[in-house]
Every structure is written in C-alpha cells, then in structure tokens.
Amino acid sequence: QKAIREYDSQRIIVRHMNSMGSGSKLKEDHFVQIAPGTVLSTLPECYPWLNTKKVVVKPDQLLKRRGKAGLVLLNSTWDTALQWLEEKRGQCIEIGRAKGPLTHFVVEPFVPHAQSDEYYVCIQAKRW
C-alpha cells in the first residue's frame, strides 16, 4: 500500500467523477493545497471563494486523529484560517509514531453536517 495526501485523492476523485459524464461537474478549484513555498496572502486571488465561504483547514500529512489532536479548524473565515495557518505552519508535532513539522495543509469549503454523516474513504488499487 502507498498512502497519498488528501489533496491528491480529492483531485483524483474529482477528475474521474467529472469524466464519467454525470451532468454536474465538481469544482476542482474548491480545495487548496498549502505547501512550504505557498504564499498565503495571494491565495484569495486564485481562489476567490476563500473570501466568501467558511472553510475547513487541516494538515495534509497522512496523520491519524487530526481532529482529536486539535489540528482541524472548522467553519472558519479565511482571515481566521490565515492566522491559524501561520501559527501551525512549521510547528513540530508528535501523534502516535508521526513526528515532525507541519508542512502541508488542505483548505476546502466547510459543509455543515452531523458527525454521523462523516465517512472515511479508502481506495486501494492493485497491479496485476
């Protein structure tokens, strides 16, 4: 097995769902990857929805239990998310066997829902 970042998995899912011709298109630009070189102040120019929608921000580093570790920001404005990112970016963490600085994050629109509606998706591919 090879784990991939949440951002990459979302891109794969959107690309393939859009190619299936269901009629409605998912927006590929409605999630943002923040890497070490990303200039945060320029993101709203490329992604205008950051200034108009509430967002979710979380590390995108193959960490388990991000929420329990206080590493998920929910229902936030972009201004608050920007401050949160500036605090968390580069911060050293230790969760289970994972240890090191927070370097990658994913930002996406906040969708209100019940905890019981939260799902974890695992896609496995095998080479034959």
Image: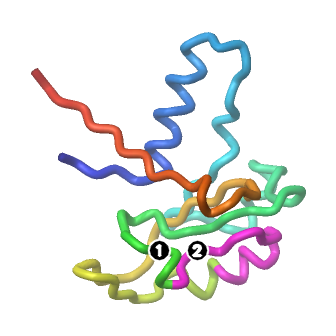
Q: Which is nearer the N-term, disc 1 or disc 2?
A: 1
Q: Is residue 38 above or below residue 47?
A: below
Quadrant in the picture for residue 24 = top right
Distance of mark 1 from mark 2, alpha carbons?
6 Å
Which residue matches tag 1?
Answer: 66
The image shows residue 10 at horizontal and vertical percentages of: 52, 42
Q: Is residue 100 above or below residue 128?
A: below
Look at label 2 and name its amino acid.
Val
The image shows residue 61 at horizontal and vertical percentages of: 39, 66
Quick one: SS at disc 2? loop
Name which residue lies at 82% across and 70% down: 77
Q: Nearer the viewer, residue 82 or 124?
A: 124
Image-based side of 11 in relation to 23, left or right: left
Residue sitting farthest toward the left:
128
Name which residue lies at 83% across and 50% down: 48
Inspect the magenta stretch and tell me whether residue 30 lies in it.
no
Quadrant in the picture for residue 21 = top right
Look at label 1 and name its amino acid.
Arg
Q: Which residues are magenta?
A: 70-84
Q: Which mark is residue 72?
A: 2
Inspect the magenta stretch and tell me whether residue 78 lies in it.
yes
